[in-house]
């Protein structure tokens, strides 16, 4: 009764205070109302709380735990999420955020991205007419896995199977826990000393141990159909690891993330990157993100352009007229949109030459998403995690763009705090 409201204590000209007024919170509450079931489970948390935390998390590049801790400490975060009185306790556990992301799905997260585009237009940071001219490019969104080696894959496979057998009360003939750890350590030591014959001998031991475990588990799952369903996906991945060679296609690079791909983009500082492609569509003038899409299968860039542009039109509700791309998009099949490919020097007006030259403005924007956001390393699990992380990075990028446009004097402080 005697507490003062945050709205009467906070600075009304603060960027988060002003940003909270630009977002249509009622739209999210209406769209996500069907995610709840009445009279079932604990009392539901406000939709604005979850959506606000997801926005602020990717706006500042925090982890799930870090975002919840910052929410308790920062009154502006609490006001942004709809709380008008200071809170001293965590509103939710950090484990609720993964469940909420999966519950929202790709369509729900795209609606949040659509809301940030509307907020940018409403604030005047971006003109609605600028949405019809875009820049498109792809980058690699790396997965949170270690650099793959055969010894590491065999060792992780042994640990995974032993842990699963223990959880399922499956008695193994031998676990190879101590032997595999010893062989893995020796393989690393020999490889570091460039004694590759000895390293390969230890690697062969690890492969033998893993093969024995797989055969032992297979024989004991014959009479346990319930456990067989649990083990089957992991066993299929590990059997593929055992059978793959250097020349094999669609190799497994991680036991817990088998869909990860090896992408070589010819970079001098990093020859190979392990993850998936992410296609990025930004407005040509302001750099507002219209869509970010995770693309699996490592397709040719030109084959993805038509699909990516359609997704951007669906999210922004604006028909795209011109797209500026690099030479990797040669051979595209887009017909209704004028596509300008960089590198052309003849037959151009001075105006069009400047527009094509500005295509490279997307490169520093991608760098900001990777270094200040969470596009540089994806910690979300599975194929769905790739799709969600890409879109959430676009949401954080748009919110930072709005803040920089509306509060240019606070730009340096904001960049330092977000970094």
Image (spheres, grey):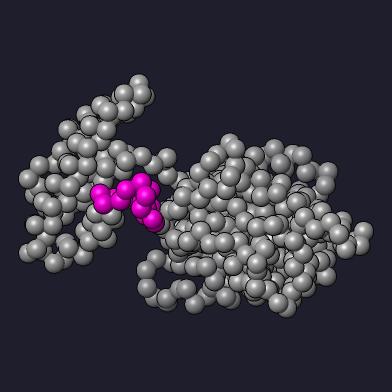
Q: Is residue 351 left or right of residue 329?
A: right
The picture places residue 374, in percent across and down from the top left corner, at: 57, 48
- Which quadrant is the N terminus positioned in? bottom right
Q: Which residues are magenta?
A: 241-258
The relative height of residue 189 versus residue 232 in the rendered view (above or below) is: above
Q: State which quadrant residue 345 falls in.
A: bottom right
- State the residue lying farthest toward the right: 350
In the displayed structure image, the side of residue 194 where residue 417 appears, left or right: right
Residue found 54% across the figure and 65% down from its top: 46
In the rendering, at what x and y percent does residue 242 appear? 25, 49
Reply yes or no: does residue 246 show up in magenta. Answer: yes
Q: Which residue is located at x 36 percent, y 46 percent?
A: 246
Question: Main SS type for the magenta part?
Answer: loop
Q: Residue at x 7, y 64 (%)?
A: 223
Q: Could one spot residue 25 in this view of the protein? A: no
Q: Is residue 156 left or right of residue 319?
A: left
Q: How many marks?
A: 0
Query: Which of the two residues, 284 or 194, is positioned nearer the viewer here?
Result: 194
Q: Residue 185, how many percent across, how many down?
A: 27, 28
Residue 204 or 255: which is nearer the viewer? 204
């Amino acid at each position: 009764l005697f507490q003062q409201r945050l709205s009467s204590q906070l600075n009304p000209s603060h960027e988060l205070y002003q940003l909270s007024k630009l977002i249509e919170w009622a739209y999210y509450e209406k769209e996500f109302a069907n995610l709840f079931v009445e009279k079932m489970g604990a009392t539901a948390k406000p939709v604005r709380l979850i959506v606000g935390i997801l926005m602020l998390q990717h706006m500042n590049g925090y982890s799930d735990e870090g975002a919840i801790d910052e929410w308790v400490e920062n009154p502006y975060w609490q006001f942004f999420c709809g709380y008008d009185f200071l809170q001293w306790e965590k509103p939710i556990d950090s484990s609720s955020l993964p469940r909420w992301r999966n519950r929202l799905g790709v369509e729900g997260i795209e609606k949040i991205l659509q809301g940030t585009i509307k907020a940018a237009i409403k604030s005047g940071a971006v003109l609605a007419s600028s949405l019809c001219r875009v820049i498109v490019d792809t980058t690699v969104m790396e997965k949170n896995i270690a650099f793959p080696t055969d010894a590491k894959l065999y060792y992780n496979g042994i640990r995974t199977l032993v842990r699963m057998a223990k959880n399922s009360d499956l008695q193994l003939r031998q676990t190879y826990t101590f032997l595999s750890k010893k062989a893995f350590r020796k393989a690393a030591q020999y490889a570091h000393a460039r004694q590759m014959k000895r390293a390969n001998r230890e690697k062969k031991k690890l492969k033998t141990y893993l093969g024995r475990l797989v055969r032992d588990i297979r024989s004991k799952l014959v009479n346990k159909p319930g456990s067989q369903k649990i083990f089957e996906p992991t066993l299929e991945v590990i059997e593929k690891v055992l059978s793959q060679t250097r020349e094999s296609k669609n190799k497994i690079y991680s036991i817990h993330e088998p869909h990860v791909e090896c992408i070589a983009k010819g970079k001098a500082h990093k020859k190979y990157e392990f993850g998936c492609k992410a296609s990025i569509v930004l407005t040509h003038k302001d750099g507002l993100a219209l869509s970010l899409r995770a693309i699996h299968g490592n397709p040719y860039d030109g084959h993805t352009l038509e699909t990516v542009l359609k997704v951007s039109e669906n999210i922004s509700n604006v028909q795209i007229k011109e797209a500026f791309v690099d030479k990797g998009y040669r051979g595209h099949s887009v017909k209704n949109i004028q596509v300008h490919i960089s590198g052309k020097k003849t037959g151009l007006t001075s105006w069009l030459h400047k527009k094509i030259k500005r295509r490279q403005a997307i490169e520093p924007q991608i760098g900001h998403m990777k270094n200040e956001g969470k596009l540089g390393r994806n910690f979300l699990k599975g194929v769905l995690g790739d799709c969600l992380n890409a879109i959430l990075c676009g949401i954080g990028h748009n919110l930072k763009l709005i803040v920089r446009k509306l509060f240019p004097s606070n730009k340096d402080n904001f960049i330092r705090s977000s970094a």
